[in-house]
Amino acid sequence: MKAWVLNRPGPVESHPLILDELPTPKPGRGEVLIKISACGVCHTDLHTVEGEIIPPAYPITPGHQVVGRVAEAGDGVSAIKSGDRVGVAWLFGACGVCPHCASGRENLCDKAVFTGFHKNGGYAEYMTAPETSAFHLPERFDDIHAAPLLCAGIIGYRALKVCGIRRGGRLGLFGFGASAHLTIQAAIGMGAEVYAFSRSDDHRQHALELGAVWAGSAQDTPSAPLDAAISFAPSGALVPLALEKLAKGGTLALAGIYLDAIPAMDYEKHIFHEKVLRSVTAFTREDAREFLQLADTANIKTDVEEYRFEEANEALLRLKESRIKGAAVLRISE
């Protein structure tokens, strides 16, 4: 099979991903072999490719917004059969017995395994995955439009839960890319008012088209203080800017897997009055099931830019340059 392989990290401008020919994997017990049709291109992939986050070993095939059909089911698989359309997301597996797993927080498991980071992911023609981490997808989404649901959508949904926004509340979204364009739809469906912050004129316009009541840059002052905010951007400099815009008692959730240095902050200006700063770490498989159901029933739509399988490096470069409206998706096969 053909697969994109990262042998060592490097600037995406240097095309560090290499298209290689690898053996088609075999599903183990409890696993399925998936013939991949589409895979979303995520900022986490970019961080992996450029070495901002380091996988345990190289070579590795990135990609964790995977859509395809089950080509073969391994021994012990019961809920999925050959021919089923499934999606695989970032959480590949967890131990299931530690205190975090036992308390419904498998996203914090010390032995968690992630797709395209610990295990080869979806920038390939085939991959294997545990049955428990392969989700049936809403039929109303075709393969290309289903892919962004599997990380951009799910992580945004968990961030909404973590930030505590309520009906009628004012929510700020900092960085308006793949995840934010789905989060805004879920938030509006919950009855929130959304304020969008982006350095890109095109992304601000996109936010307004999707129902934001206000859009500006992170340096601008919105028309009202925010009850909660989510930052999707990997920029630590946004943290104090976002905290300044929170009302008393507001929460800022940091939804990225990577963040550069946060500058020094002023206690009274940024943190006082019971403001909360917290991170979002991956998501649970229950989050995934909840969001996929919500995406189906709440009429959430995904805006995508489609790229050929051979264009993986080019898609990552456009993502780095903030030149993608919505989400980038590789078409692996028909």
Image (spheres, rainbow, N blue to C red):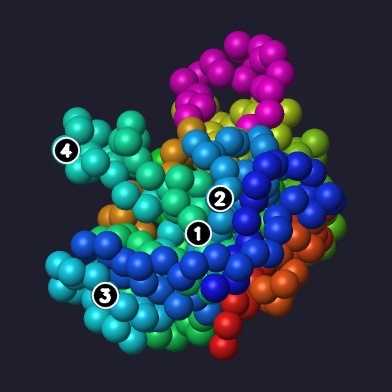
Amino acid type, mark 1: Gly
Q: From mark 2 to mark 1, how far is it between C-alphas?
A: 8 Å
Q: Is residue 37 above or below residue 192?
A: below
Q: Main secondary structure of the magenta part?
A: loop
Tell me if label 2 and label 4 are in contact, CB under 8 Å: no
Question: Residue 226: x and y, percent?
Answer: 58, 40
Point out the stretch of residues depicted in magenta.
Answer: 259-278
Q: From mark 2 to mark 4, how far is it between C-alphas?
A: 27 Å
Q: Label 1, on which residue?
A: 121
95 is within the stretch colored magenta: no
Q: From mark 3 to mark 2, how far is it between C-alphas?
A: 23 Å
Identify which residue is drawn at 35% across, 67% down.
26
Q: Quadrant of the C terminus?
A: bottom right
Q: Label 4, on which residue?
A: 97
Between label 2 and label 4, give the one nearer the viewer.
2
Question: Residue 223: x and y, percent?
Answer: 70, 45
* Quarter residue 80 falls in: bottom left
Q: Is residue 139 above or below residue 318?
A: below
